[in-house]
Amino acid sequence: ALKKLPNPDEYQFLVFGPADEKFARNLGIKAFYMGYISDPMTMAELYNVCDVFVCPSIIENLPYTCLESICCGTPAVAFATGGIPDVIEHRYNGYLAKPFDIDDLANGILYVLENRISLSQNALIKAAKDFDCRTLIQKHIEVYESLLTNTKD
């Protein structure tokens, strides 16, 4: 997908986690390799310097990387598979590409870059609305109460 971006010299990308540096050389896009990051503050800073987060996973349950990204206000692009659509709402806080369609993933990257400001604001709204600790705890309590009520009948 990165090879399909026009004007590759206008982009830079940041890679964290295990990665092969030969990957970037084949793209012709300047890359910064950060390796494994264990410090949450450093991770948040890295998300915050990015305009878009790309998660090219083909199988994911609920990817923390996408969740971390939107919590930092960085729109995400990923395939619409597994639990990813629970985190990314198509064209609201990111872009959901058709599963395994590299052209659509590239289109998503460009879409996010062109709409970064509104998507970033929506990412923070989505994170607060659906993934705030208090909200999640309340949702769990409601499920437990519902189960308790149903077992009494």
Image (cartoon, rainbow, N blue to C red):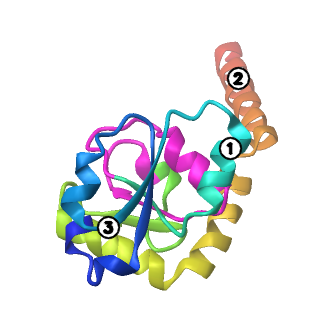
Q: Secondary structure at mark 2?
A: helix
Q: Residues within 10 Å of mark 1 (few under 14, many from 20)?
A: few
Q: Residue at the spot x=19%, y=63% of the render?
A: 102
Q: Which of the labelled discs sits on residue 153, or is there none?
A: none
Q: Residue furthest top?
A: 152
Instruction: Name the kind of residue labelled 1 in the image.
Output: Thr
> In the figure, is residue 42 to the left or right of 4?
right
Magenta stretch: give its range. Answer: 56-85
Q: Which of the labelled discs sits on residue 42, or is there none?
A: 1
Residue 9 shown in magenta: no
Of mark 2 and mark 1, the one earlier in the sequence is 1
Instruction: Name the kind of residue labelled 2 in the image.
Output: Tyr
Instruction: Tell me the quarter of the picture where residue 61 sits.
Output: top left
Give x and y (percent) for residue 93: 54, 67
Q: Residue at the spot x=19%, y=55% of the render?
A: 100
Of mark 3 and mark 1, the one earlier in the sequence is 3
Residue at the spot of label 2: 144
> In the figure, is residue 50 to the left or right of 82?
right
> In the figure, is residue 93 to the left or right of 27?
right
